[in-house]
Image (cartoon, rainbow, N blue to C red):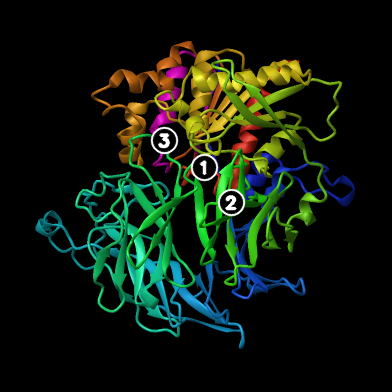
Amino acid sequence: MRQFIVPVMLGLSALTTQFMVAPVSAQEAPKTFQAEDIFALEWANDVQISPNGRYVVYVRHGFDIMKDNTKRALWLVDTETGSHTPLFDDQHSYGNPSWSPDGSKLAFSSNRDGRNQIHVYHLATKTSSAITEVTESPRQFSWSPDGKHLAFLMNVAADKTEYAKAVKKPKAPKGAKWAKPPVIVERTYYQRDGAGVLPDTYSQIFVVPSEGGTARQLTSGAFSHNGPLAWVDGGKALVFSANRNDDWEYQVNESDLWKVAVQDGALTQVTDMPGREWSPISSPNGEQLAFLHRGNEAIPYHNAKLRIMDLDDNDQRELLSDFDRSVDSPLWLSNDRLAIQYADRGRYKLAEVRLNGNKNEWVDDVGGVSVSRPYMSGMFSVAAGGNKVAYTRGSSYRPADVAVFDIPRRGAAKPQSFTALNDDVLGHRQLGKVHEFTYNSSFDDTEIHGWYITPPDYDPNKKYPLLLEIHGGPHLAYSPMFAAEQQRYAAEGYIVFYNNYRGSTSYGAEHALKLDGFYSSERDHADHMSGIDVLIDKGMVDPNNLFIAGGSAGGIATAYAVGLTDRFNAAAATNPVINWISKTLTADSYLGQITNQFPAMPWEDYDHYWKRSPLSMAGKVNTPVMLFSGENDRRVPMSEIEQFYQALQLRKVDTAMVRVPDASHGVTARPSNMIAKIEHTLAWFKLYHKK
């Protein structure tokens, strides 16, 4: 029996030692995608087109090999000349670019002054200055129609509770080194993955002159107010989303639109529909408000619907009522046309919607922002004149670049890419070929959509080991976009199979809800195994060398699968839930997860929670399992994999536990940890290959 507990070491020297990355000469340059290539990846995000459509500013992301983090710079594309130049690209971090209404100024956030502040860049003079001096990080910027003010969100500390005020303690003597004071927790929603135990703060709305000055707080109270922020009433008020009920923390499926007056902070409730209303955006003439709405049924998935409100009388109507997809990011093109983004069969698409309900699809290659795994991702922006769109354009072989197109009168758009951020690296690597296919699940004949990657230099006369990689969520979706993890596995000789099993989004509400009450179970397991059998029947897969991996919900499916079958040689489960009772009562997501995913409280329906838990299957596991998790994970606490590790150790099953210091649920956020996850998985699987 092997016993492994492997701490993942951070830092370049440890990484280089761990993965045996040796310098190579030009003659020895690798042909396939290597672990160290991940540090060289770059991608575009937050692309913002200027009001006149000529310029696009975007956040250029890349990895810093020395600091082991993500660099964020601001770059500018001139769509007339094609020039591609940096605005700010240095040791500081930049984000949230936002054009002024006349296009003469650009607001952005940066930590260049020691902490995050709002800066404004003047295009005419090519100068910039900080316009805020605030103690917390501002976000969700929104220019007033006249360009004289910026609204934003920022966290504000709440007043001390009566309990906190009542605690008395002596002062420490000068020079004494006492322990850190205890942290009092009284809030219902008190922790968040990646942030830990939250300070007692609430998100409030502020406004500041765009030429600089004192930021003025408009909202208050123990409520979280959410953007985007929409200016209405000729710039005299802002519309936002919030739940301002006393029990808002328990009402996870409720939020309304509110209006706050800029002059005196007076509040008016704008909507009161059952469910959530969010993402308000005002029409160019200021007479209408577009927003998104979803119901409040206690189920794990809802389609977001597009609604239009007339601001003079608050009359509403819903567009695309029969459209069985979730609408995202509405933006006005003119007073009777909007642009929307929506997920459809593993792809993000952009389309135009008219107020009469007619829809015209433009492009279906929005993506490339998730570089680790092929999650659907990406965004877009529109020029004020409603004639041009900029977006993040991805493909199976490249992360996101900046693309722009003229809005067609009808039919598909013809986008032009203005960057090629990864040709310097990926242009010199042989990548695995991505293939799309559909098949039917053996459980109930449900159609499942998936992809498989064949290794570089694939030989159709050979049989290859197969690596099934399962996405998280489960109410998320994979896409055919570039993914460093999948390409790395393919480079090591695997056929890499991934799919959008039942529960995945972008296939309609019915498909997304097919796991309701059965997550994980024999149902999604059948979706995966049926795909494997199809690939075996194609003659390309060695049935004696099958491997399974996944993260979060995919990690749960992996841990559950090895209790249902012995067909896999080995498994690698990243941050999986092992025991739903302990998970829901320790994780940051307990409020929404218990409400929407389970039929009752854990102590009221123990049998349901236990049946969905991989721990209930531990007595049947014979497959070697590697468990990988961040030690600071609050979405799926570390104690989850410890339970499975100890259970399998008691049964003398080969098991490794890999603990990633200082990492949260997004365990691959730092590039060295992304590499660690990949290379630990490859090393574990190599031990169990059959000849």
Query: Residue visible at 45% across and 77% down?
Result: 145
**Which residue in the protein does label 1 denote?**
323
Comes first in the chain, label 1 or label 2: 1
Q: What residue type is labelled 1?
A: Phe
Q: Name the quadrant of the C terminus.
A: top right
Examine the structure image and report whether residue 598 is included in the region drawn in magenta.
Answer: no
Could you say which quadrant of the image residue 420 lies in? bottom right
* Observer-nearest of 657 and 504: 504
Residue range highlighted in magenta: 632-659
Comes first in the chain, label 3 or label 2: 2
Disc 1 from disc 3: Cα separation? 41 Å
Label 1's element? loop
**Which residue in the protein does label 2 denote?**
359
Label 2's element? strand
For label 1, count other residues whose C-alpha is less than 10 Å away and answer few (under 14), some (14-19) or many (20+): few
Examine the structure image and report whether residue 646 is included in the region drawn in magenta.
Answer: yes
Q: What residue type is labelled 3?
A: Met
Asked if marks 1 and 2 touch (Cβ < 8 Å), the reply is yes
Extreme residue in the right direction: 27
Image coordinates for residue 283, horizontal then vertical, percent: 47, 67
Disc 1 from disc 2: Cα separation? 10 Å
**Which residue in the protein does label 3 denote?**
638
Query: Residue visible at 76% across and 30% down?
Result: 493
Q: Is residue 180 left or right of residue 196?
A: left
Q: Is residue 114 visible?
A: no
* Observer-nearest of 637 and 447: 447
Label disc, if present, on residue 367 of the rendered structure: none
Image coordinates for residue 599, horizontal then vertical, percent: 31, 26
Q: Which amino acid does label 2 sit on?
A: Lys
Q: In this view, does 209 lie to the left or right of 410?
A: left
